[in-house]
Image (tube, rainbow, N blue to C red):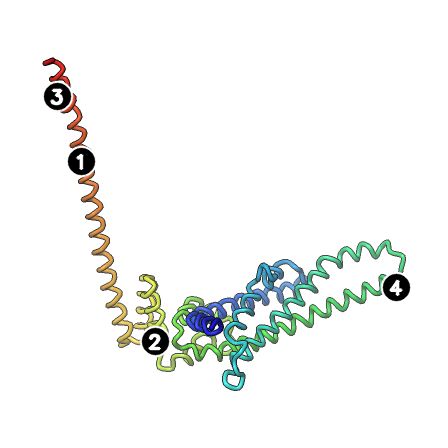
């Protein structure tokens, strides 16, 4: 029963998980490219790697990505769903390679400078030779690790692209892709970028993608974004019925909202006037009571 409930919980949130997986993959790959450039220009440093990978008690983006992939796809049949299977496996491999890179970078960053200082005063040649060999191997491991990570990221990106072709009804995902065109174009620049991916998901036209995003915005009351999405759909296809209908619904929703706000504003003003009137009447009633009391005293 517990397993069934867990599966149901995952199914209900699958769209969000898939969107977050794309988001975290983009971030992780972008961070790796920065590491690669820094390594090429200045050499490896530990800085940032701990946040990228993380720990069991403080998971980094890559750790979260790996866990979310496992949640969705670790038990799937590779014969039936090969793309999710390979992507999940590759993300796991990326994570473990990154973990090794982090540890190797720590060894070089933390201990190699200290070794260089100590080696100037050490008398044992064998000790120095062993340490030199150790750090030489570590640096070679770092170089190999970066190369492996690069290959894994490139392959994983293509498997992710193929995987997302089956996510046509995931409006959260489509919205995210449209919002992050630049990042996604960089991710898949060698295979046509975002437009080619969306063309494959929406073969009848990209206006469908923008309409889906517009409807999602509308559902979440993001009215400005909804209008922009529907307008973009009409730029692509001036005869798009879904976009025209979406704009009509949006205008109706805005009028209803304006009417509701106007009614609330009128009600608030009315209440303020009533409170002011009550306050004024109490103010005038006090002297009257005092005068009455004075009159009675005088008569006595």
Q: Nearer the viewer, mark 3 or mark 4?
A: 3
**Label 3 vs 4, first from the N-terminus:** 4
The residue at the far left in this view is 299
Q: Nearer the viewer, mark 3 or mark 2?
A: 3
Q: Quadrant of the C terminus?
A: top left
The residue beneath circle 3 is: 292
Q: Nearer the viewer, mark 2 or mark 1?
A: 1
- What is the distance, in whole Å, between disc 1 and disc 3 at their CAs? 21 Å
The residue beneath circle 4 is: 126
- Give the percent coordinates (x, y) of residue 206: 37, 76
**Label 1 vs 3, first from the N-terminus:** 1
Residue in front for this viewpoint, 262 or 76? 76
User: Is label 2 in a helix, a strand or a loop?
Assistant: helix
- Give the percent coordinates (x, y) of residue 43: 68, 63
The residue beneath circle 1 is: 278
Asked whether residue 177 appears in the rendered view, the answer is: no
């Amino acid at each position: 029963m517990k397993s069934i409930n867990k599966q149901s919980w995952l199914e209900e949130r699958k769209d969000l998980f898939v969107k977050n997986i794309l988001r975290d993959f983009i971030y992780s790959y972008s961070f790796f490219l920065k590491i690669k450039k820094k390594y090429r220009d200045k050499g490896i440093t530990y800085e940032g790697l701990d946040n990228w990978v993380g720990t069991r008690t403080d998971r980094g983006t890559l750790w979260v990505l790996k866990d979310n992939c496992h949640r969705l796809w670790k038990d799937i049949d590779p014969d039936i769903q090969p793309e999710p299977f390979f992507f999940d496996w590759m993300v796991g491999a990326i994570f473990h390679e990154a973990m090794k890179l982090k540890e190797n970078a720590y060894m070089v960053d933390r201990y190699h400078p200290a070794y260089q200082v100590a080696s100037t005063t050490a008398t044992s040649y064998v000790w120095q030779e062993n340490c030199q060999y150790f750090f030489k191997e570590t640096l070679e491991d770092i170089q190999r690790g970066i190369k492996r990570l690069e290959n894994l990221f490139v392959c994983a990106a293509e498997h992710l692209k193929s995987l997302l072709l089956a996510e046509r009804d995931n409006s959260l995902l489509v919205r995210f892709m449209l919002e992050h065109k630049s990042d996604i174009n960089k991710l898949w620049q060698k295979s046509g970028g975002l437009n080619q991916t969306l063309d494959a998901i929406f073969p009848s036209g990209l206006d469908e993608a923008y309409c889906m995003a517009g409807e999602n915005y509308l559902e979440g009351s993001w009215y400005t974004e909804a209008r922009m999405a529907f307008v973009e759909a009409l730029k692509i296809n001036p005869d798009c019925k879904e976009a025209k209908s979406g704009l009509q619904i949006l205008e109706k929703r805005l009028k209803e909202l304006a009417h509701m706000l106007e009614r609330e504003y009128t009600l608030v003003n009315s209440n303020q006037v009533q409170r002011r009137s009550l306050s004024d009447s109490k103010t005038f009633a006090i002297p009257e009571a005092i005068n009455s009391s004075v009159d009675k005293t005088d008569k006595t």
